[in-house]
Image (cartoon, rainbow, N blue to C red):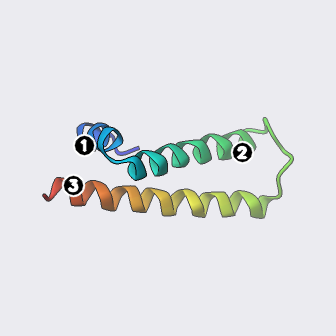
Amino acid sequence: MFHEYRDIVTKLKQEDKHFKKIFDKHNDIHDEIEKHETGKNNHIHPLEIEKLKKQKLRLKDEAYTMIINYKNK
């Protein structure tokens, strides 16, 4: 996620606990969705997958906002 901002992401993960938390949570949700979509775990309702996708997107948006704010300091 955000490969073009790799240096900023690294700094934020070290300096900002909230950023690290949402970044890690985003990655955890990504992995969970991937497991469900590849058939490795079919014990979840499709609507739950959609909820996870929306949560993942909210986290990504929040992380992106923090990256841009850091970049524009």
Residue farthest toward the right in the current orientation of the protein: 43
Q: Earlier in the sequence, mark 1 or mark 2?
A: 1
* Label pair 3/1, CB-CB below 8 angstroms: yes
Q: Is disc 3 in contact with disc 2, using a CB cutoff of under 8 Å?
A: no
Figure quadrant of residue 38: top right
Is residue 19 rendered to the left or right of residue 29? left
Q: Quadrant of residue 2?
A: top left
Q: In the image, is residue 64 above or below residue 1?
A: below
* Residue drawn at x 79%, y 39% as measured from the top left: 39
Residue indicated by mark 2: 37
Give the label on residue 8, or none: 1
Q: Give the residue type that dot 1 points to.
A: Ile
Look at 84% across and 44% down and name the residue there.
42
Q: Earlier in the sequence, mark 3 or mark 2?
A: 2
Q: CB of mark 1 within 8 Å of CB of mark 2? A: no
Q: Position of residue 57 (x, y in %)?
A: 51, 60
10 Å crowding of disc 2: few (<14), some (14-19), many (20+):
few
Q: Amino acid at mark 3?
A: Tyr
Residue 67 percent across, percent down from the top left:
28, 54
Circle 2: element type: helix
Please give the label number shown on residue 70.
3
Task: Specify the amino acid type for callout 2.
Answer: Glu
- Secondary structure of the residue carrying tag 3 is helix
Q: Which mark is residue 31?
A: none
- Residue 33, image x, y percentages: 66, 47
Q: CA distance from mark 3 to mark 2?
A: 34 Å
